[in-house]
Amino acid sequence: MATPLVVSEVAKSFTMHLRDGIRLPVVSNVNFSIKAGECVVLGGPSGIGKSSLLKMVYGNYGVDAGQILVEHEGQFVDLATADPRSVLAVRRVTLGYVSQFLRVVPRVAAVDVVAEPLVADGAIPAVAREKAETMLDRLNLPRELWQLPPATFSGGEQQRVNIARGFITDHSILLLDEPTASLDAKNREIVVDMIEEKKRAGVALLGIFHDDDVRVRVADRVIDVSAFSPRKIAA
Ligand SMILES: Nc1ncnc2c1ncn2[C@@H]1O[C@H](COP(=O)(O)OP(=O)(O)OP(=O)(O)O)[C@@H](O)[C@H]1O
């Protein structure tokens, strides 16, 4: 089975430049890989480094050492050392990310926020919008909100726009940072179904889920990030 994501020997510290350059080690010796069709969940206590690790895999945080290998258009790209243009190409085609909060673009309608990743990858705008509407419908976003910018939406409504945007592409790797945090039970259920569909389609998923019920249902494997934490030794 294909292994589209390999994280190898990764280490990361934060340097607090405004605090006399204090270094805050977060993780070291991070080694894991994810197979196509597998959902791996990052576990461990609050503050241990789960979100930081997810941001490193997406290329938002740099790493001090190691490799983050992503299979992109038939070859492996190391996101730990890739130039910004390559990182953007990988994100457009291969690597998706659903963050906990929607980054709202002023004056852009919800349906266009959702369609944007497809349009950016060359889809016909009308076709992309149609698919966006199908996603918003499935996630029960009221139809009268589709043409409005999501800035004034509730937390759960914004999160559903974010999920629709993250799930609309056929990316082969999907990162999920608490995608169900603000959802009610019915919509949580829909997101669990959408994750299972992605697994069946051969997508490799890496996620953080604080909701035990969701985690148990979607996870093929839980990686305890404490195993990579220098703080474990100090505790
Ligand atoms: N940009 C940053 N600059 C400095 N320190 C940071 C930064 N981001 C995270 N940290 C620190 O790194 C540690 C890990 O944070 P992270 O958010 O990755 O933890 P987490 O396991 O996701 O926590 P939670 O479950 O509470 O969301 C924390 O001590 C945090 O203060």
Image (tube, helix red, strand yellow):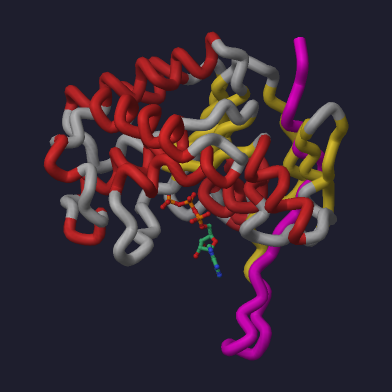
Q: Main structural element of the magenta stretch: helix, strand or loop?
A: strand
15 in the magenta segment: yes
Residue 194, above or below 90: above
Residue located at (83% from left, 49% from top): 66
Residue 107, above or below 7: below
Q: Position of residue 215 (x, y in %)?
A: 40, 25
29 in the magenta segment: no
- Position of the C terminus by quadrant: bottom right
Q: Position of residue 91 (x, y in %)?
A: 64, 45
Residue located at (63% from left, 38% from top): 95
Residue 103 in sight from this viewpoint: yes
Q: Position of residue 219 (x, y in %)?
A: 49, 20
Residue located at (57% from left, 46% from top): 120
Residue in the foreground of this view, choosing between 109 and 197? 109
- Examine the image and state in which quarter residue 93 appears: top right
Q: Is residue 213 left or right of residue 21?
A: left
Q: Is residue 80 left or right of residue 34?
A: right
Residue in the foreground of this view, choosing between 213 and 100? 100
Residue bounds of the magenta highlight: 1-23
- Examine the image and state in which quarter residue 170 appears: top right
Residue 38, above or below 81: above
Q: Is residue 185 left or right of residue 106?
A: left
Q: Is residue 210 left or right of residue 147?
A: right
Residue 75, above or below 61: above
Q: Position of residue 14 (x, y in %)?
A: 64, 69
Residue located at (18% from left, 59% from top): 152
Residue in the foreground of this view, choosing between 194 and 18? 194
- Position of the N terminus by quadrant: top right
